[in-house]
Amino acid sequence: MSIRSTASSVEIATVHGPAVAEIDEAADPRFLLVITHGSAGGVDAPDLLAVRDAVTPIGGVVARVLQPFRMRGARAPGSATKQDEAWLELVAGLRGLRPGLPLVQGGRSNGARVACRTASPAGATAVVALAFPLHPPGKPERSRAQELRDAGVDVLAVSGDRDPFGVPEAADTSRLVVLPGEGHDLKKDPARVGEVVAHWLGARMRAAPE
């Protein structure tokens, strides 16, 4: 694994290709939030930007990660095993740049699944799951709820009540927030998404070690 840094952009080479993280600093760093996109999205999704804007003022160093499969131009992550392997590598690289900060990881849609699946081996203290895709549209029998249950850490799930991918059950998360009128993209009122995440993380990280 190698790392090349330019200003706020960091390129991390993994066994499955390079990833790029856009890092936004906090004036008083309290924790590191590594967050990523969905299958066909990018790091400038409205909800990800809103989370960044809300979390940096409470001490979150926010790294928005463009994963290797998107760097290759693919619109689907392919093998979950390979995706998770790359994620663990890039998170380790980012943690090396910000030693001592507690790790929170998260993502939207497919990225939320990755964050849940890798939370324990990554050493995360919590997961932020935006628009977690509970099941493929129209196929509720293909539930992915076990990924939420198996995270091994507290999970905040934020979903829209009009999400065709479904909404998790409160019992499968530490905290579930369902936003009225929002779909899978959570772009109707992204600032509200950021507020929810910052409120939850602020309460958790207030006592984080210096």
Image (cartoon, rainbow, N blue to C red):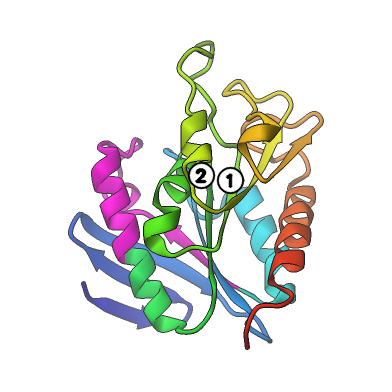
Residue 48's place in the image compared with 13, above or below, is above
Residue 164 versus residue 39 in the image, above or below: above
Q: Secondary structure at mark 2?
A: helix
Tell me which corner region of the image, top left, top right, bottom left or bottom right, holds residue 164.
top right
Q: Is residue 187 above or below residue 85?
A: above
What x and y, as percent, mark residue 125?
Answer: 54, 63
Pinpoint residue 92: horizontal percent, then vertical percent: 35, 70
Foreground of the two, 72 or 139: 139
Sequence-first disc among 1 and 2: 2
The image position of residue 127, as x and y in percent, is: 56, 54
Q: With 197 as the anchor, is 92 left or right in this view? A: left
- Residue 129, which numbered label? 1
Residue 92 is labelled as: none
Q: Is residue 8 magenta?
A: no
Q: 10 Å neighbourhood of mark 2: few (<14), some, or many (≥20)?
A: many
Q: Residue 208: x percent and y percent?
A: 65, 78
Q: Quadrant of the N terminus?
A: bottom left
Compare residues 206 and 193 and report the one nearer the observer: 206
Magenta segment: 61-89
**Residue bearing the label numbered 2:** 112
Are the residues tagged 1 and 2 within 8 Å (C-beta)? yes
Residue positioned 54% across, 54% down in the render: 153
